[in-house]
Image (tube, grey):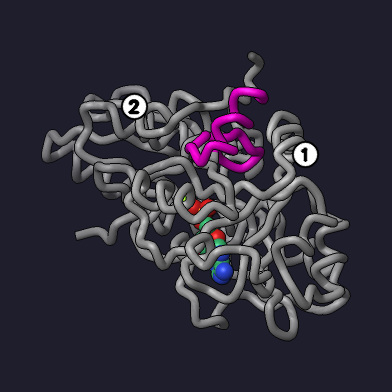
Amino acid sequence: MNIIDKALDLLKGGKLVAIPTETVYGLGADAKNPLAVQKIYAVKGRPPTNPLIIHIPNADAMSHFATDIPEDAWRLAKAFWPGPLTLILNRHTSVPPATTGGQDTVALRVPNHSITLELLARFGGGIAAPSANRYGRISPTTTDHVREELGSKVDYIVEGGPCQIGIESTIVYLAAGSAMILRQGHISATELTAVLGYDIMVKGGPAIEAPGSSLSHYAPIKPLYLLEKLSLQNIMTQLNDQKRHYDVISFASPPEIEPYISQWITASNDPIQYAQHLYSHLRDLDKTNSECILVEAPPNTELWLAITDRLARAARPLE
Ligand code: AMP
Ligand code: MG
């Protein structure tokens, strides 16, 4: 039996299947089967009020999961799907509230990964899939990460290689009036604005607290501090004086002699590549014998917004 046949059988039987996407690996279940969906919440330890994203095979399938779909949604879907954009629309009554965390709205996305697109086309329905990690932890971007996070709690893991984008989708709220960004991602406000023909608003709006927007999300186990270049050097000096081990992610090359650095990662200056490797780096650094991770803050520009957002949520304030 090939991997897609196997995944299909399990999903139809109400089981959990980890699926590859271009953003991060998802923990998938049949979006219209409330019992299957409840398993996602149980395995992740995710509060039941946190809504899931439903993955669908194409834009036309939107109308099986949402109602009163505005013109803006069709326009964005046409421009960016398959791709790392999630649209929040009014929930169709056929979608169980268990899948939407009790909300009257629903999150939809067509992922850009050939295996998952084939799986979705053959499944015929929608696959509800949040990131395949325990609640609050770093999202997985390889199947090894998924195994590390969930082990035997997931019925099957579809191998689809490392995720190409590496951070979660941009989320756009479209259930009332004009579009608004709820979560930053690979697709920027500038790109969305160009398609919509008006300036898209950013957050501040709907009453729903997005799980990805709560503090201490995407977080390694050991403390992570996000620092401007000068403070980074400062803290490194202090930690050296105290003979405490630490890891660094910086845009600079490592200093020649630095006995208390357990691992130094020279990060890419290209935000696309930085995002692709970010979660893998954080997982690797979580396994070293250091006490903490110091990360040099990325440039304060739109291209780095989604990355800075994830780092800020992974970071702790300096004590
Ligand atoms: P994850 O798949 O773990 O990245 O999380 C799903 C994301 O989609 C969360 O950040 C949710 O806030 C967001 N989301 C899903 N459904 C809704 C909804 N109905 N309204 C607002 N946000 C949603
Ligand atoms: Mg998540």
Q: CA distance from mark 2 to mark 1?
A: 43 Å
Mark identifier at residue 263: 2
Q: Position of residue 102 (x, y in %)?
A: 48, 71
Q: From the viewer's perspective, is 90 left or right of 295?
A: right
Query: In the image shown, does 312 or 144 lie closer to the viewer?
Result: 144
Report crowding for label 1: few under 14, some 14 to 19, many 20 or more residues within 10 A (C-alpha): some
Q: Residue at x 69, y 83 (%)?
A: 176
Measuring from the top left, give residue 226's x and y in whole percent.
Answer: 38, 53
Q: Nearer the viewer, residue 244 or 117?
A: 117
Q: Amino acid at mark 2?
A: Gln
Examine the structure image and report whether residue 143 is included in the region drawn in magenta. Answer: no
User: Magenta stretch: residue 20 in it?
Assistant: yes
SS for callout 1? helix
In the image, farthest residue toward the left: 242
Q: Is residue 119 above or below residue 192?
A: above
Start-end of magenta stretch: 4-25
Residue 277, by quadrant, is: top right
Task: Tell me if 46 is positioned left or right of 308 in this view.
Answer: left
Of callouts 2 and 1, which one flags the residue occurring earlier in the amino acid sequence? Answer: 1
